[in-house]
Image (cartoon, coloured by chain):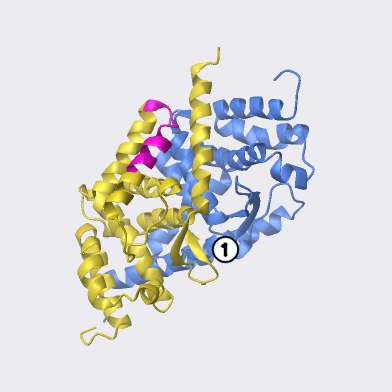
Chain colours: A blue, B yellow
Amino acid sequence: MTPPEQTSLDQQFAFLKEIDQLKSVVRKSPLLNQSRRENSAEHSWHLAMYALVLQDSAPAGVDINRVIKMLLLHDIVEIDAGDHPIHAHVDMAAIAAAEQAAAERIFALLPTPQGESLKALWQEFEAAQSADARFAKALDRLQPMVHNLETNGGTWNEFNVGFERINERYLPIIQSGAEGLGQYLLARLKRFFNKSDA
Amino acid sequence: MTPPEQTSLDQQFAFLKEIDQLKSVVRKSPLLNQSRRENSAEHSWHLAMYALVLQDSAPAGVDINRVIKMLLLHDIVEIDAGDHPIHAHVDMAAIAAAEQAAAERIFALLPTPQGESLKALWQEFEAAQSADARFAKALDRLQPMVHNLETNGGTWNEFNVGFERINERYLPIIQSGAEGLGQYLLARLKRFFNKSDA
């Protein structure tokens, strides 16, 4: 008989092996040195660092340790469902279904209570209702915008996205999760797009 | 006058921009699909996931949130000092000095109290004395070994490393930080190297 501790470890290492594939999911956003596009694993690391560094910009009551964990695992479903840039025209319902199926498959590799717990954390992130999830979502939207600002427009050029679309569609998610970061970003966006009141 | 909050944010975003370079520091270890070598940013993400998933294997009293933060930032000094595989013959004192200088430069990009606090966390990791740091170090040693086991020997072949050297030099660090994980790994190593009592 295999002892239960070893079975748990076998399951945990199977999960840790599976998620190595996130390093091969390539996003649209370039690295800041523009040598290549970013992958979802290093993006997740960068976002966790955003949370660690910008924690004082989170609303009162946000648990930064939960936010970091959400951001570490928020893209794991892309192993099955792929990355879908927010500027692209895509079937959101189909993507949500594919991501849900991916979460069911991948988190089930873990011992049951642990897999259910991490899946619940991912679902909380996706639902974007709790303060922790809204802050995590704000950072997930913020980082690619900062990269675009630092790379002379980046994916905004590729998808023909201008100030008005950013201001109406993407900025509210950041302002809703982290008001101060939203204001800071808005000022940088205005300078970048040469808006007169910047 | 620039308000102090904006100065802090400017410094924090300068740091977050600087550490994007960790995505271009390439390690010896391959991805599990062997398509390319791993970089230090995605390696740091994977280690943070190791900590999250394997937290029940940590000794009592270990604060997994501190461990995750340590692992997120443990390799940032490689932006200046490079990655040095443990199997290679290198001048350890020279590397330690280069890493210390890198830490001084990079963490100083942040507002002072925050930069000092994160540098102290990095130094705690490097010193490997606290239970948190020993568990983090154990995971940092464990992950490349698991990758070698999963890729038919990986960098062990490249550096001509056998069971005895692993058992004497690398395994004790894992056993010291996480005894159960050390035992689990030893059993896998014995099977891999066809040791008779496996």
Q: Position of residue B174 (x, y in %)?
A: 25, 62
Q: Is residue A31 left or right of residue B166?
A: right
| Residue B103 visible in this rendered orientation of the protein | yes
Q: Nearer the viewer, residue A140 or A154?
A: A154
Q: Position of residue B23 (x, y in %)?
A: 52, 52
Q: Badge 1 is on which residue?
A: A24
Q: Is residue A124 left or right of residue B74?
A: right
* Secondary element at image label 1: helix
Instruction: Identify which residue is drawn at 52% across, 53% down.
Output: B24
Q: Is residue A113 left or right of residue B10?
A: left
Picture quadrant of residue A152? top right
Instruction: Identify which residue is drawn at 49% across, 29% down.
Output: B11
Instruction: Identify which residue is drawn at 58% across, 41% down.
Output: A143
Dot 1 alpha-carbon crowd within 10 angstroms: few under 14, some 14 to 19, many 20 or more = some
Dividing the image into 4 quarters, which one contains the N terminus of chain B? top right
Q: Is residue B88 magenta?
A: no
Q: Nearer the viewer, residue B161 or B15?
A: B161
Q: Nearer the viewer, residue B165 or A94?
A: B165
Q: Nearer the viewer, residue A56 or B15?
A: B15
Instruction: Identify which residue is drawn at 20% across, 64% down.
Output: B172
Question: What are the residue bounds of the magenta stretch?
Answer: B100-112
Does residue B185 lie above or below A58 as drawn? below
* Mark 1 belongs to chain: A
Residue type at numbered disc 1:
Ser
Considering the whole magenta stretch, tell me its main secondary structure: helix
Does residue A179 lie above or below B16 as drawn? above
Q: Position of residue A69 (x, y in %)?
A: 44, 48
Picture quadrant of residue A12? bottom left
Dividing the image into 4 quarters, which one contains the C terminus of chain B? bottom left
Does residue A173 lie above or below A120 as drawn? above
Q: Position of residue A133 (x, y in %)?
A: 52, 41
Q: Is residue B110 magenta?
A: yes
